[in-house]
Image (tube, coloured by chain):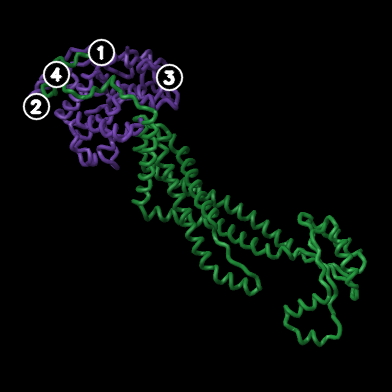
Chain colours: A purple, B green
C-alpha cells in the first residue's frame, strides 16, 4: 500500500499564488525518496500538506490510506503523531534537556515514564547521543542538534519520516552522516521523504528523486540510479577518512 | 521499498544491528497506561508551571499582590456587612411597638387587653409591663434611686410591648396595626420604633448589592489581569507551542501548562488576600470591640469563617483558571505550525 499518495493535488494561497499544481505521485511503504527543486518550487508546501499544516485546494492527499481532507480538526494531532518530522532549524526547545526534547512526542502520546525512558534512550542511542541526554541542546553542535531532532522524530516509531532541508546548515561530512541516519531508519521499514536542494549529496545516494519546479512535477529519477561526479568522489574520500 | 543496501556510503553502520525496529512494532498503549500518563502529565505541568512562576518570583509576586487586592476588596465589604448584620440582630427586638396605656388604667384591664392583643394574627407576642415594674426597671438601669424615691406617685404609665409578626414589616401593614391599636380602649399612644431599623435594612440591602457589584467588577479585573499575564506567557512560549502542535499535541495538551499557571496565580492571589484580610481584621478587632462595648453591646468582630476563607481561595483559583482558559482559547488558535 502506498504510504503517501498525491492524487492531482493543487494548492493555491489566497492572492492567487499557486504553490502546487496538479501533482500526482506516490511513495510506497518503506521507500526512501528525495524531493528536490529550487526555493519556492513547492517542497515545503508538499510536506505541509502531508503534516496537515495546510489543506489541499484540489485533489487528494492520502497517508496510510487515510484521505487527509476527511481528517477533522480534532483528529489532526493524532494524524501528526503517526508522522515524524525533522526540520532544517531542528526546532528544539532550549528550556529543557536533550532527554525532555526527545521525550516530548511520547508525553503527548501518553506514555508512562518507564516506557518513555526506555524509548527515549533507544532513540538517543540510535543517533549516538545517549551520553548527552542531560545536557541542554544549546550546548551541542549543529550536527548533534539535528540528530536530536531526528531522535525526536523517530521516538514515537512513525511509519513515515518527513525532513525539510535536514542538512541545510551542515557541512558535507555532517550532512552525509545525517543522511546515513535516515537510511538506517529506512532499512528497518520506515518510509522517508527528504526535501533538500543539496544536489551533490543527493546525487551520491541511490534513492528515488522527485523533482519539483514551480509546483509541478519536473522529472523523476528512480531508485538505484545515481550520478557519479568528481565532487561526489571527493566527498566519499572525505567520508572514508573519518 | 528502495534498495537502500545498494552502494551504501562506506561510513554506514551495519543495518542488521539488533535494535528495536522503528516501524510496524508500535507497542500498544493500554487505557490504564494512558490514564496514568495523563495524571503524570498533569502533575508534571502543575509542578513545572509553579516552578516557572517561582523562577521569576519578583514579577509573579506583583501579579499575586494585584490579584490579592482585587480579591480582598469585595471580601472586606462582605465581612463588614456580615458584622453589621450580626450587630443588627440584637437590635431586631427594637422592631417592637410600645403601646402606652392611659394613666391609671387598672392592671386587670391591661392584662385583658394584652391577652386580647396576643390573639391577633399580626401580633407575634405581647408583654405587659406594669407601671411598678417599669419603675423598678428604670431605677435599676439608671441608678436614680434617690430621685425616684422622692416622687409621690409613679409617673410611668403601663406599657404593652407588642412584637409584630415578622414578614408583616411592610410599612402599610404596620401602620394599619398601629391604627388598630390606637383604637383600643385604655390606649393612650403607640410608639413605632421601627423606622430606623427599616432604614438600616435598606442600607444593608444596598450594601449587599454593592458587594455583588464590586465582586463582579473586581472578578472581571482578576480575569483580565490573569488573561493578560497568560497572554504574555503564551507569547514567550510561542516556539514551544508550535513544536508541540507539530509533533501531535492536542489543544488540551497545549492548554494544560497555561491553565495550571492560571490556577497558581489564582491560588496565590486568594491566599494572600486571605492573609491581608485576616491581618486587617485582627488589627481592627480590638478598637472595634471596645467601641461597640461603649454602646453596652456584647460584640465580637466576626472574622473570616472557615467556609468564607475557603470560598475566597476557591474563587481565586476558579477565576485564575477561567482567566487562563479565556486567554488560551483566544490566543492559542492563532499559533499554528
Task: Tell me the quarter of the picture where residue B198 sits.
Answer: bottom right
* Residues at marks 1 and 4 touching, judged by CB atoms closer than 8 Å: no
Element under label 1?
A: strand
Of A235 and B138, which appears nearest the observer? B138
Where does the image place residue B141, in percent across and percent down from the top left?
72, 78
- Residue B135, percent across and down? 80, 78
Residue furthest out toward the front: B108
Tag 2 residue:
A238
Asked if residue A11 shows in the view, the reply is: yes
Whether pointer 3 and pointer 1 mark residues with C-beta atoms closer than 8 Å, the reply is no
Residues under labels 3 and 1: Cα distance?
26 Å
Q: Give whichever of discs 1 and 2 has the lower sequence position.
A: 1
- Spatial CA distance of label 3 from label 4 is 38 Å
Q: Mark 2 lies on which chain?
A: A
Residue A54 placement: quadrant: top left
Q: In this view, does A215 lie to the left or right of B288?
A: left
Disc 1 designates what residue? Answer: A220
**For residue B8, which numbered disc appears in the image?**
4
**Which of B250/A25 is in front?**
B250
Q: Which residue is drawn at 33% across and 32% down?
A: A111
**For residue B284, which quarter of the picture?**
bottom right
Q: Position of residue B22 (x, y in %)?
A: 25, 23
Q: Do the residues labelled 2 and 4 touch (CB within 8 Å)?
A: no
Q: Which residue is disc 3 drawn over? A: A69
- How far apart in space, not on screen, are marks 2 and 4 (Cα)? 15 Å
Earlier sequence position, callout 2 versus callout 3: 3
Amino acid at each position: 500500500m502506498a504510504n503517501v499518495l498525491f492524487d492531482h493535488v493543487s494548492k493555491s494561497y489566497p492572492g492567487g499564488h499557486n504553490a502546487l499544481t496538479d501533482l500526482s505521485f506516490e511513495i510506497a511503504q518503506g521507500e526512501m525518496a528525495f524531493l528536490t527543486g529550487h526555493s519556492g518550487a513547492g517542497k515545503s508546501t508538499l510536506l505541509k500538506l502531508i503534516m496537515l499544516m495546510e489543506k489541499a485546494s484540489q485533489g487528494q492527499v492520502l497517508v496510510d490510506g487515510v484521505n487527509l481532507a476527511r481528517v477533522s480538526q480534532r483528529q489532526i494531532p493524532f494524524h501528526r503523531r503517526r508522522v515524524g518530522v525533522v526540520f532544517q532549524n531542528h526546532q528544539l526547545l532550549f528550556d529543557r534537556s536533550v532527554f525532555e526534547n526527545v521525550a516530548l512526542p511520547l508525553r503527548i502520546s501518553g506514555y508512562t515514564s518507564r516506557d518513555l525512558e526506555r524509548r527515549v534512550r533507544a532513540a538517543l542511542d540510535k543517533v549516538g547521543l545517549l551520553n548527552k541526554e542531560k545536557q541542554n541542546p544549546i550546548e551541542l553542535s549543529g550536527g548533534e542538534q539535528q540528530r536530536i531532532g531526528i531522535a525526536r522524530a523517530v521516538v514515537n516509531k512513525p511509519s513515515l519520516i518527513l525532513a525539510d532541508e535536514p542538512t541545510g546548515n551542515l557541512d558535507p561530512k555532517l550532512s552525509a552522516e545525517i543522511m546515513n541516519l535516515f537510511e538506517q531508519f529506512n532499512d528497518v521499514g520506515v518510509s522517508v521523504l527528504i526535501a533538500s536542494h543539496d544536489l551533490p549529496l543527493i546525487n551520491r545516494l541511490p534513492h528515488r528523486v522527485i523533482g519539483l519546479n514551480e509546483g509541478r512535477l519536473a522529472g523523476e529519477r528512480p531508485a538505484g540510479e545515481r550520478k557519479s561526479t568528481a565532487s561526489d568522489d571527493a566527498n566519499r574520500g572525505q567520508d572514508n577518512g573519518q | 521499498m528502495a534498495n537502500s543496501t545498494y552502494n551504501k556510503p562506506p561510513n554506514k553502520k551495519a543495518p542488521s544491528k539488533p535494535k528495536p525496529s522503528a516501524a510496524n512494532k508500535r507497542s500498544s498503549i493500554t487505557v490504564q497506561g494512558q490514564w496514568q500518563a495523563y495524571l503524570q502529565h498533569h502533575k508534571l505541568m502543575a509542578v513545572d508551571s509553579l516552578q516557572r512562576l517561582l523562577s521569576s518570583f519578583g514579577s509573579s509576586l506583583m501579579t499575586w499582590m494585584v490579584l490579592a487586592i482585587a480579591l480582598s476588596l469585595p471580601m472586606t465589604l462582605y465581612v463588614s456587612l456580615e458584622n453589621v448584620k450580626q450587630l443588627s440582630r440584637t437590635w431586631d427586638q427594637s422592631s417592637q411597638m410600645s403601646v402606652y396605656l392611659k394613666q391609671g388604667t387598672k392592671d386587670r384591664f391591661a392584662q385583658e387587653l394584652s391577652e386580647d392583643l396576643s390573639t391577633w394574627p399580626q401580633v407575634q407576642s405581647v408583654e405587659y409591663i406594669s407601671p411598678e415594674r417599669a419603675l423598678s426597671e428604670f431605677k435599676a438601669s439608671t441608678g436614680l434611686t434617690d430621685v425616684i424615691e422622692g416622687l409621690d406617685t409613679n409617673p410611668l404609665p403601663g406599657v404593652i410591648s407588642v412584637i409584630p409578626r415578622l414578614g408583616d414589616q411592610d410599612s402599610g401593614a404596620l401602620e394599619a396595626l398601629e391604627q388598630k391599636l390606637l383604637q383600643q380602649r385604655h390606649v393612650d399612644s403607640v410608639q413605632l420604633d421601627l423606622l430606623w431599623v427599616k432604614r438600616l435594612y435598606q442600607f444593608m440591602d444596598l450594601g449587599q448589592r454593592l458587594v455583588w457589584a464590586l465582586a463582579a467588577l473586581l472578578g472581571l479585573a482578576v480575569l483580565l489581569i490573569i488573561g493578560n499575564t497568560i497572554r504574555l506567557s503564551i507569547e514567550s512560549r510561542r516556539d514551544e507551542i508550535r513544536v508541540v502542535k507539530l509533533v501531535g499535541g492536542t489543544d488540551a495538551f497545549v492548554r494544560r501548562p497555561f491553565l495550571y499557571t492560571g490556577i497558581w496565580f489564582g491560588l496565590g492571589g486568594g491566599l494572600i488576600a486571605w492573609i491581608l484580610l485576616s491581618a486587617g481584621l485582627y488589627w481592627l478587632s480590638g478598637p472595634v470591640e471596645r467601641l461597640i462595648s461603649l454602646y453596652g453591646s456584647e460584640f465580637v468582630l466576626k472574622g473570616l469563617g472557615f467556609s468564607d476563607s475557603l470560598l475566597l481561595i476557591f474563587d481565586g483559583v476558579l477565576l485564575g483558571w477561567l482567566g487562563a482558559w479565556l486567554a488560551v482559547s483566544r490566543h492559542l488558535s492563532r499559533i499554528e505550525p
